[in-house]
Amino acid sequence: MENKHILVVEDEAHLAKGIQFNLEAEGYRATTVEDGASALKICGNPDETIDLVILDLMLPGMSGYAVCDTLRASGNDVPVLMLSARTLTEDRARGFEVGANQYLAKPFELVELLSRIKNLLTFAARRKELEHRDADVRWFEFTGVKIDFATHRVDVRGQPLRLTNLELKLLQYFIQNEGRVIARNELLEKVWQLPGNLSTRAPDQFIRRLRKYFELDPANPKHFLTIRDVGYRFVAEKFEED
C-alpha cells in the first residue's frame, strides 16, 4: 500500500524539517512548503495526491485560515490539522469554522501530533469506504452499539432501542461525517431542513438524547462531543479531544 502523503505548511524551517523527519520515520511521505500559495498549488494539482495537511496558522502573505477556507470553498475535503501558538477560544473556533478538522496548540508533544494524524487518516479512510459502498450509511457498529438504518433496528449492548425517524436521521448524519466538527446551523439545514440561522435549541436537545441512549456516562460523553462555540463531533473510537 502506498504511503500516505502529508503536506506540511510551516514557515519556520527548523520546525517544518523536524515534523518532516518524524513523519518519514513513521513511514509517511512528507512534503514541506512555507506559504499558503504553494500549499494551494500542490493541493490543486490533479496529478498530486495529498492525504492530510498540517497547516500553520501564521504564514507569510496568506494565513492558515485563508488557506483552509480556500480549500473548502473549492470542494477539497482533505483532513486539515491546524497548528498555532494562539490558544484563545475564538482562534480555535475560527479554525473550525473555516473547515479545520483539528487544532493543535504549539508547543506540542510529538506523540500527540502523531496520534492526531493517525486518527484523522483513519476517519478519512472510513468516510471514503462508506462513500464507495453506498451514498447512505446502512449499517454501523461502535462500542456495543449496532445500528441497521434500513430496518430501523438499534441494539445497545444487547438491548433493543427504538428511535424516532429524526433521531435516526441525526445519528446517520453524524456517522456519515465521523470525526468532522459539525456546526449547529449545518445540522439545522441538513437534518431538520430548516434555515441555519433559526434560533432553536432542537439540536442540543436531540444530542442530549443520543448521549442518554448510547453513552456509558452521558455526563462525560466519549462519542457525541461538544466543541465549545463551534458545534459537535461524533467519534466511534477514542480520539484526542481539543
Image (cartoon, rainbow, N blue to C red):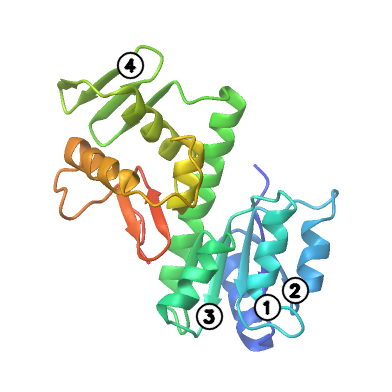
Q: Residue at x 66, y 87 (%)?
A: 12
**Residue 36 coordinates in the image, percent (x, y):** 75, 73
For the residue marked with disc 1, what is the amino acid? Ser
Please tell me whether mark 3 sits on a helix, a strand or a loop.
strand
- Per the image, the residue denoted by label 4 is 152
- Per the image, the residue denoted by label 1 is 63
| Residue 134, picture quadrant | top right
Disc 3 to disc 1: CB gap under 8 Å: no
What numbered label is drawn on residue 36?
2
Eye-nearest disc, 4 or 3: 4
Give the mark nearest the N terminus, 2 or 3.
2
Please tell me whether mark 1 sits on a helix, a strand or a loop.
loop
- Tell me if residue 140 can be seen: yes
Determine whether 65 is above or below 106 in the image.
above
Disc 2 to disc 1: CB gap under 8 Å: yes
- Per the image, the residue denoted by label 3 is 84
Give the mark nearest the N terminus, 3 or 1.
1
Eye-nearest disc, 2 or 4: 4
